[in-house]
Image (spheres, rainbow, N blue to C red):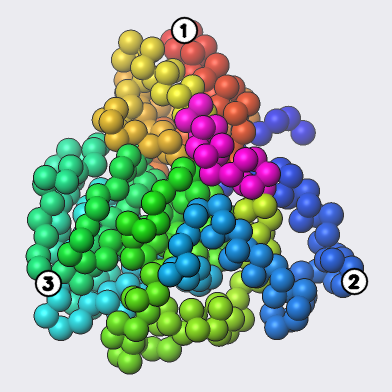
Amino acid sequence: MTAVYNFNAGPSALPKEVLQRAQAELTNFNGTGMSVMELSHRSKDYEAVHQNAIDLLKELYNIPDQYKVLFLQGGASLQFSMIPLQFLKEGTIGNYILTGSWSEKALKEAKLIGKTAIAASTKENNYQSIPTSNEFQFNKNDAYVHLTSNNTIFGTQWQDFPTIDHAPLIADMSSDILSRPIDVEKFGLIYAGAQKNLGPSGVTVAIIKEDLLEVNVDQVPTVLRYKTHADSNSLYHTPPTFAIYMLNQVLTWVKEQGGVNAIQKRNEEKAKLIYDAIDESNGFYRGHAEKDARSLMNITFNLPTEDDNQKFLSKAKELGFVGLNGHRSVGGCRASTYNAVPLEACVALREYMDSYRASN
Ligand SMILES: Cc1ncc(COP(=O)(O)O)c(C=O)c1O
């Protein structure tokens, strides 16, 4: 089989070593004579995997003791509802910073539940940038402020996070969790579907400050309360055991790579190759994001015409590049360079971009 360069936006590339380890122990996990998928979620073999994943994430991300790591289901999309259900009570406002389609979706769900506001938005420039702190409009009765740290579809990313004092800051980090170090203490809640940087789809990670667990809790259905999952160490009901097993393998791999600082350095190197191909193309490739808002995870660009985009993409496909199409809502091209995408894939893409331009 010829080499495949996987630039899928999610689900996306997993580290080869992780897949090989999972394959090696697929039918006999830890000497149990069965797959990890067949173990009881109450067994000591499974519980060790579950706890190790929690401990490793805390270690890798420097998560302070007053935060809980939760494993939830329903994807990041269920968080769009769980957050307002839990935190938006009568007389308060869910305040959203809009930087792309996913923040719009989060806002849309909150509107079904309570009062909302838009603290800032970059919709008027087609989400090419990230708002600056002086643009934010806050209210004294904000229940929380919500942002999307990386905009998977438009290819922009917050470079620094604002410090917000009047309400908890909540971040959807689905497409850049663990791609760079962050100061967890700036946030009341961080959440992410696993299927980009953490593992396969099926598990959603939440990192929540303990003092938020009690808010409004009686009004929320049991399985949708953060407290339910915090109190039971995410074993209130059957967790997605295989996805958590894979998450544990991915976290182990991140640690072996040298941790989040080393991962960030590699991500910067990878993204630079592709942004350089754009910047040195004399306008042949046009990046969507403004330079100071560029994402290290999703690199979005266009060729001079839509016809050129299609020709570039179809030739790329023949050469083994997978997933370079832009999101169906915006078109163009997008290279997703998540943690597990190897440097070689980005080198190959850069070479292809240069040679395609030279011959067109
Ligand atoms: C930033 C962001 N938020 C939310 C979602 C939706 O995640 P899920 O499919 O896990 O509900 C995605 C999916 O791509 C995303 O990129």
The image quarter in which residue 27 lies: bottom right
Could you tell me what secondary structure mostly forms the magenta stretch?
Answer: helix
Q: Residue 358: which disc? A: 1
Q: Which amino acid type is marked by label 3?
A: Asn
Q: Can you name the residue that lies furthest to the bottom here?
A: 218
Q: Residue 159: which disc? A: none
Q: For residue 98: magenta?
A: no
Q: Residue 141: which disc? A: 3
Q: For residue 261: magenta?
A: yes
At numbered mark 1, what does the secondary structure look like: helix, strand or loop?
helix
| For marks 1 and 2 on the same chain, the one whose residue lies earlier in the sequence | 2
The image quarter in which residue 140 lies: bottom left
Residue positioned 64% across, 70% down in the render: 51
Q: What residue range appears in magenta? A: 253-269
At numbered mark 3, what does the secondary structure look like: helix, strand or loop?
loop
| Separation (CA) of disc 3 from disc 2 | 56 Å
Residue positioned 52% across, 39% down in the render: 261
Q: Residue 33: which disc? A: 2
Instruction: Left or right? Give the position of 29 relative to 139.
Output: right
Q: Can you name the residue that lies furthest to the front here?
A: 65
| For marks 3 and 1 on the same chain, the one whose residue lies earlier in the sequence | 3
Q: Which amino acid type is marked by label 1?
A: Ala
For discs 3 and 1, the disc positioned in front in the rendered view: 3
The response on whether ligand 1 sits within 8 Å of label 3 is no
